[in-house]
Image: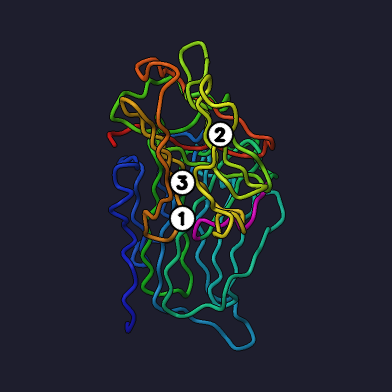
């Protein structure tokens, strides 16, 4: 082992995971070991961080080594599965009764570290690698809510370590795109989402009657995040220009933070660099509503295949 690879545990994500749904995987464990977690619902997500230090393949058959994570129903029958074939540098996502959806990645090395997110949405199961969208399957979408566990299989891939983890159920954004929770002064809401290509996303902080105090507009047609204080601004105000970043150039997972203060808001957008909290932000001064009246967060998008999947409210 000549290369130092990152740990499969990410300390920066520790506050945002369900400790009861964090599982360690290694090549020293038995294959097909079944493990259970809570029943999935739409907008649930699973993060997998994985590394290996070696694998075996024949010159004429580079598919002799693989790693598979299969998602199971309560009977132990697999519904959907995710496979890495390191020798052929391929990822595959597939359903039990469907085709393999396969994509190639950069030429692999014996020693490699990966970060994946699987998003179980009502528009399909989506696979992201290093925050970038790779492939989707829709063939078993109607069985997502039957998933209650997983098993792994590691074949001719050596010194494998991985962690599979999920956010708490309370962090899942409901399918009606409404969060009914107040955001107190000195707190912020963190929103994680998957934008549809060329979509325009709206995130509104509102009172209990959904009268908006602040509108955050993330425009993936121009690469600009705007803000608008409803009742005070006559037009959208530019906050963050992300048009020259990978966040605009490719379909990537998104993260926005909105902090509430006595006399202003702070709006920040994540740039999604691996193991980095690089954010671009701006301050928005002045309130139309009392900040104590913010009771809901409401989402919308011009493309309904956008997925808002997790949120957290925490001190700034």
Q: Is residue 292 visible?
A: yes
Is 38 or 275 nearer to us in this picture?
A: 275
Residue 13 picture location, percent across and down:
33, 49
Is the residue 89 above or below the residue 82 in the image? below
- Disc assigned to residue 272: 1
Alpha carbons under labels 3 and 1: distance apart: 9 Å
Is 72 or 222 nearer to us in this picture?
A: 222
Residue 43 picture location, percent across and down:
53, 36
Is 120 or 303 nearer to us in this picture?
A: 303
Residue 52 picture location, percent across and down:
40, 72
Q: Which residue is mark 2?
A: 42
Q: Which residue is mark 3?
A: 269
- Disc assigned to residue 69: none
Label 1's element? loop
Is 70 or 44 nearer to us in this picture?
A: 44
Q: Does residue 76 appear to the left or right of 136 in the view shown?
A: left
User: Tell me, what colour scheme is on the image?
Assistant: rainbow
């Amino acid at each position: 082992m000549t290369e130092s690879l990152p740990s499969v545990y990410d300390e920066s994500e520790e506050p945002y995971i369900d400790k009861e749904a964090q599982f360690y995987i290694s090549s020293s464990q038995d294959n097909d070991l079944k493990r259970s977690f809570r029943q999935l619902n739409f907008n649930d997500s699973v993060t997998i961080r994985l590394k290996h230090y070696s694998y075996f393949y024949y010159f004429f058959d580079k598919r002799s080594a693989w790693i598979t994570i299969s998602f199971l129903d309560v009977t132990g029958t697999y519904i959907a599965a995710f496979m890495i074939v390191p020798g052929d540098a391929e990822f595959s996502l597939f359903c039990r009764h469907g085709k393999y959806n396969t994509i190639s990645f950069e030429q692999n090395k014996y020693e490699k570290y990966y970060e994946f997110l699987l998003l179980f949405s009502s528009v399909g199961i989506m696979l992201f690698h290093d925050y970038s969208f790779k492939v989707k399957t829709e063939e078993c979408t109607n069985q997502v809510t039957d998933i209650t566990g997983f098993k792994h299989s590691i074949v001719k891939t050596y010194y494998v370590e991985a962690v599979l983890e999920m956010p708490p159920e309370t962090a899942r954004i409901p399918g009606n795109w409404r969060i009914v929770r107040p955001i107190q002064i000195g707190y912020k809401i963190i929103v994680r989402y998957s934008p549809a290509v060329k979509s325009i996303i709206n995130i509104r902080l509102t009172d209990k009657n959904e009268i908006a105090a602040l509108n955050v507009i993330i425009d993936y047609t121009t690469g600009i995040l705007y803000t608008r204080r409803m009742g005070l601004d006559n037009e959208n105000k530019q906050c963050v220009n992300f048009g020259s970043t990978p966040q605009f150039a490719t379909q990537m997972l998104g993260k926005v933070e909105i902090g509430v203060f006595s006399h202003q808001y702070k709006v920040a957008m994540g740039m999604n660099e691996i193991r980095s909290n690089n954010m671009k932000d701006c301050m928005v001064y002045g309130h139309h509503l009392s900040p104590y009246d913010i009771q809901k967060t409401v989402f919308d998008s011009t493309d309904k295949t956008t997925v808002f999947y997790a949120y957290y409210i925490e001190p700034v």
